[in-house]
Amino acid sequence: MNQLFKITLRNDYAFKRIFGSEENKDVLQDFLECILDISPKNIEGLELLDKEFHKELLSEKLGILDIKLRLKTGTFIDIEIQNVRHRDFAERTLYYWSRMYNSGIKKGQDYTILPKCITINLIGKGFNKNKRLHNKYLVLEEKTKEPLASKLEIHILNLERARILKEDKFNDNKTKRLLNWLKFIETDDPEVRKMLAETSKVMAQANDKIIIMEMSHKEKWLYESRMKYEHDRASCINEGYQQGLDKGSYQAKLETARLMKLKEFDINLIQEISGLPIEEIEKL
C-alpha cells in the first residue's frame, strides 16, 4: 500500500499514538531517559494511566490529548505537545500540574504522602523566554537556589529550537539523544526521520510505527480530525482575543467621551477624539 499522507508528531494524536500506547512503552521510556534526572531502572516498567484515547477521539469532543503515566517510585508524569505557545500557557501548565498533584491525596490523609508530579510540555513554536532546548522549572529559594520541595518539576522542550540546532553543539550523549528525538518529533519529512532512526534502534521502531500509520485510511482520518480541531481551536482563541481587544477599546472610547462631556467639551470635538457616533455620545 502506498503512503496516504505525511505525518508530524507535532499532531497530538500522532504523538500519543507513538508515545502513549502499551506496545510502544519502550519508546516512551527511551524518550523520558533523555529528559529526566531519574535512573533508567526507575523509568522501566512505567504504567500508562490513560489507554482509551482511541474511543474518546472518535467523538471529536476531547480537548487535550496528553500522556499520563506513573513510575514505580509513585511519581506521576503528564506529557503534552502544543504546536503553538498560547498566552495562558504558563498559568494553564500550573493548573494542570496542581490538579495532578491534588489527585494524589484523599480527605484526612497526611500531606507528606503527596506524590512527586512532573509536567513535560513540548512546544512547536512561540516559546521565546530563552534559546535553551530544554528548560526545567522548580520551586527554589531566590538567593540560595535551594529547593523548597522536590515534588514539582515542569519541563519545557523547544521544538522550534531543535529544528536549527546541530548535534555537534552538545558534548553529552544524553542531550544529543534528546535533540534527535525532538527533531524526529518536529519534522514531517520521512527522509529526515529515516536518517534520525539510523542513530537508534528504539527510534527506528517508532519510525516503523509511523510508516504503518501513513498507510492507513483510519489513521489518516483520525490524524486529520485532530489537525482540524487544532486549527479550529486556534481560530477561536485568536477570534476571542480580538473580540476582547475590541471590547476594551470600545470601553476606553466611552470613558473618554463621558469625561469630555462632563467637562462640557464641544460634541463635535468629542466625536473627533473618541471616534464614537454623535448619537451615542448624546446618550452618555
Image (cartoon, helix red, strand yellow):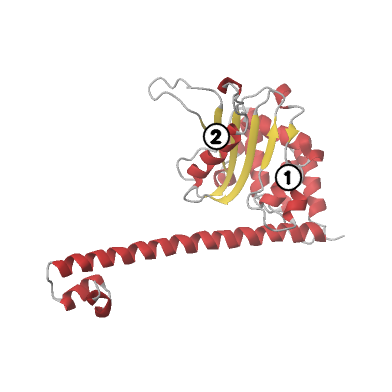
Q: Which of 93 and 218 is in front in this view?
A: 93
Q: How many labels does the image show?
A: 2
How many residues crowd around disc 1 within 10 Å: few (fewer than 14), some, or many (20 or more)?
Answer: few
What residue is at 17 percent from the left and 70 percent from the top? 261
Q: Is residue 209 above or below residue 32?
A: below
Whole-number angstrom distance, CA of label 1 to CA of label 2: 30 Å
Label 2 sits on residue? 154
Quadrant placement of the C terminus? bottom left
Left or right position of 254 against 216: left
Quick one: which residue is furthest to the front in this view? 108
What residue is at 79 percent from the left and 62 percent from the top? 4
Residue 195, labelled with which disc?
A: 1
Left or right position of 69 against 107: right
Q: How far from the left and from the top, in percent, is residue 65?
A: 66, 48
Amino acid type indicated by mark 1: Met
Mark 1 / mark 2, whichever is N-terminal:
2
Circle 1: element type: helix
Q: In this view, does 14 lie above or below 224?
A: above
Q: In this view, does 173 lie above or below 195?
A: above
Q: How far from the left and from the top, in percent, is residue 122?
A: 59, 43
Amino acid type indicated by mark 2: Ile
Circle 2: element type: strand
In this view, the mark in front (1 or 2): 2
How many residues crowd around disc 2 within 10 Å: few (fewer than 14), some, or many (20 or more)?
Answer: some
What residue is at 59 percent from the left and 49 percent from the top? 82
What residue is at 81 percent from the left and 59 percent from the top? 218
Res 2 quadrant in image = bottom right
Q: Nearer the viewer, residue 153 or 209?
A: 153
Quadrant placement of the N terminus? bottom right
Residue 32, labelled with which disc?
A: none
Q: Is residue 174 above or below residue 194?
A: above
